[in-house]
Image (spheres, coloured by chain):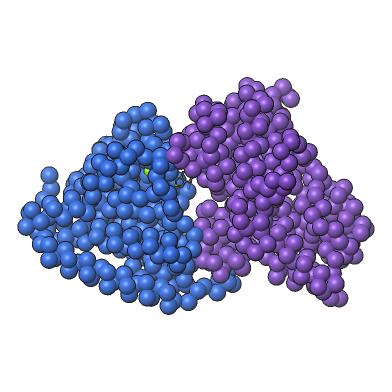
Amino acid sequence: MRKLTIAEALREAIAEEMRRDEKVFCIGEDIGIEGGFGGAFTVTLGLSDEFGHERILDTPISELGTTGIAVGAALMGMRPIADLQYGDFIFLAMDQLINNATKLRYMSGGKLKVPMVMRIPVGASLRGAQHAQSVESYLVHAAGLKVVCPSTAYDAKGLLKTAVRDDNPVMVFEHKLLYGAKGRKEGMDARGEVPPEEYLIPFGVAKVVREGGDVTIVATLRMVYEAILAAEELKRASISVEIIDPRTLVPFDWETLFNSLKKTGRLVIVHEDNLTGGWGAEVAARVADEAIDLLDAPIKRVCSYDTPVPFSPPMENFWVPGRERIVKTVKELFSS
Amino acid sequence: MIKIPGEKLIWMYKTMLKIRHFEDKIHRLFLEGNMPGTIHLYQGQEAVAAGVCANLERSDVITSTHRPHGHALAKGVAIKSLMAELFARSTGCCGGKGGSMHVGDPDVGMIPAIAIVGGGIPVATGIALAFKFQKSKRVAVSFFGDGACNEGSFHESLNMGAIWNLPVIYVCENNLYGASTSIRVAVKIRDLAERASSYGIPGVVVDGNEAISVYQATSKAVERARGGQGPTLIECKTYRRGGHSRSDACNYRDKEEEKMWLTRDPVVILRERLTKDGILTPEDSKQMEKEIEEELTQAIHFAENSPWPKPEEALEQVWA
Ligand SMILES: Cc1ncc(C[n+]2csc(CCOP(=O)(O)OP(=O)(O)O)c2C)c(N)n1
Ligand SMILES: [Mg+2]
C-alpha cells in the first residue's frame, strides 16, 4: 500500500472534506499564498490550486481575530479549519477559544453549535522557548473542546476527517518532528500506510500500539515513538510493555486503559509537557479514583520538567522525555 | 534637519557593515550545519537598526523580534556572546537558553528578543511606563515588523502609550512581507504610519534603506519622548535581501520588485553618501571590513571553543 507522511495525510483529509462539503474552508497565516509555504509545515501546500483563495483564506498575523472569525463562521453553519502555525500562539487565541468557542453553545441553552477545527503544531524542535510548547493540557482543561493527537499518518487522516464533521470545536495537535518524510530522530518515522479509500477514525478509541503484559505506557504524539524505543530496550530486560496511544485526550478511552491495567497492573504516563497540571495528572487521578484495585504499583509519570523549553540541544534533549527516562522509570517499578 | 556629527555617521556605517558581515557569515555557518534551530536574517534592513540605535544611550531599552541579530549588534550586545548564543553554548548572551530568536542582553538595554509577533510592543510600552514613574529620561524603543501591526497588541499598546504620553518609540520595519504574505493583501491602507492618527500620535514614513533618514526621524521621536510629549510611530520602508527564514527562495515575491529593492542596498547607499561628503574614504571602509572580519573570526573561535550548557542547567533560572 502507498505510504504517506503526516503532512500529506492531513492535506489529503482536508482536500477530501472540502470536496465533500462546500461549507468547509481553511483559514490562517501563509496557508495559500502563491509561491509560499502552504502553512508553516506545508500541510495546505497546493490546496488553493483546487479550491481557490476564497476557501484557502490567508489572513494577516491576527490570531485572536482569526480564531473569533472561525467561531463566528462556525456559528452560521460553516466548518472552518483554522491553522495556528505554532502551539505557542494559542495563547493569543485563547480568549476566543475559551470564552466563545466553548461557551456559546452552553450559554445559548444548547441552541448554538461551533463546528470548527484548529490545527496546532506542537513540540520542541530546537527553535527556543516561544516555538516549542506542547499546549494540549491547557485545552484538555477547558470543558467543551475535543482534543486530538495523531501520531501516525493513518490516524492523522482519519481523525482530521472526523474532526471536520464533528459539531463541536476540535483542537488537532500535530507534532513538528513527525510531519516529514523521514524521522528527524531515531525511531521516529511517522510515515505510514494510508489506504486510498475513505475512512474515518472515531474519537475516544485508543490504539494499542504494542501488546504486552507487565506494564502499560500511555503516550501521545512524539512520545509514542520514545515509548516504542523504550519498550524494545525493556524487552531485553524481560519486561513486556503494552503501549496505548489514546489518540484523543478528550474524549478519553478509559475502557481500553482499564482493560490494559487488568493485565499489567502498572501504569506509566509519558508526555512532552510540564509535569504539573499536565493531562497525565488527570489520567493518574482517574485511574487512582476508579481503578486503584487494578494497580500493583504506584502510578508514574515521565514528563518534561516544570520550566519553559530551553534552546540549546543538550538542555532540550534533557527536557524532552526520552527513552532513557522511560526505561529507568519502568525498571524502578520492578526493582522492589 | 539636524546636522549629524561625523562620528555618528561613521558609527552607523560601521554598525551596518558589521551587521551585514555578521549575517552573511551566520547564513553560511547555518547552511553548513554549524548552528541548531532556525534563523531569520537581517540583511537589507541594517539602516533601521543603526539609524535608530545611533540615537540611543546604553541605558535606553529596546525590544526586538524573531529577526533580532541586527538590533542586538546595534544596541551593543557583545559579538562574542551573540555568536556563542547562536552556537547554543553556555557562554552565549542567554546562556544557551534563548537561541537566535531570543538574543539580547539587559546589561546593554536589550530585552531578550520576543519571537511572538507583536509581543514586544506592549512590553516596550510598559518599560516606558516604568521610566515615566521613575521620572527618568530613558526611552524605550520597540522594533517590530509590518506583520505585527495587525495584532491586537499593536493597537492596544499605541493607544495606551498615547493616552499616557509614554516615552516610547514604535519602529515598524515594513519590509513589505510578513513571512510569505504581502503587505498588500494584509492591510488596505497605503502606509502603516497612517494608523498613528487613530491614536493621536505622530506617524512618519521614512525610507528605511537610508540610514540618515531613519536617524533624523528617530532623533525627533527621541526628543519628543524624552521631553514627555509621548510616543511616535516610525514606519521604515525596507526589504529583506534574503528569505524569511532558513532556506526560503522567496517565490512569492515579484521579481521586478525584488530587483528594484536589491539595487537599493542600504550599506552601499550610506557608503556612497559618506564618501561623497568626504567623511569616509574607500580605504577607511576596507580597513573597517578587515577589522570586522577579524572580530568575527575571533567570535566564531570563541563560540566554537565554548562549552555546551550542562543538561541540568535547563532547570535553573525559572524563579527569581
Ligand atoms: C503571534 C505570532 N504569530 C505568528 C508567528 C509566526 N511568524 C514568525 S515571523 C512571521 C512573519 C512576521 O512578519 P513581520 O512582522 O512583517 O516581520 P518580518 O519577518 O518581516 O521581519 C510569522 C507569521 C509568530 N512568531 N508569532
Ligand atoms: Mg515584514
Between residue B167 and residue B245, name the one nearer to us: B245
x, y (%) of residue B299? 35, 72
Residue found at the far front of this picture: A1
Q: Is residue B280 visible?
A: yes
**Quarter of the rendering containing residue A263:** bottom right
Tell me the purple chain: A
x, y (%) of residue A173? 65, 46
**Quarter of the rendering containing residue A278:** bottom right
Q: Residue at x 25, y 55 (%)?
A: B50
| Quadrant location, ligand no. 2 | top left
Q: Is residue A322 left or right of residue B305?
A: right
Q: Residue at x 25, y 38 (%)?
A: B205
Chain B shade in the render: blue
Between residue A108 and residue A38, name the one nearer to us: A38
Between residue A178 and residue B41, name the one nearer to us: A178
B152 vs A87: above or below: above
x, y (%) of residue B66? 43, 52
Q: Residue at x 88, y 52 (%)?
A: A258
Q: Residue at x 65, y 64 (%)?
A: A186
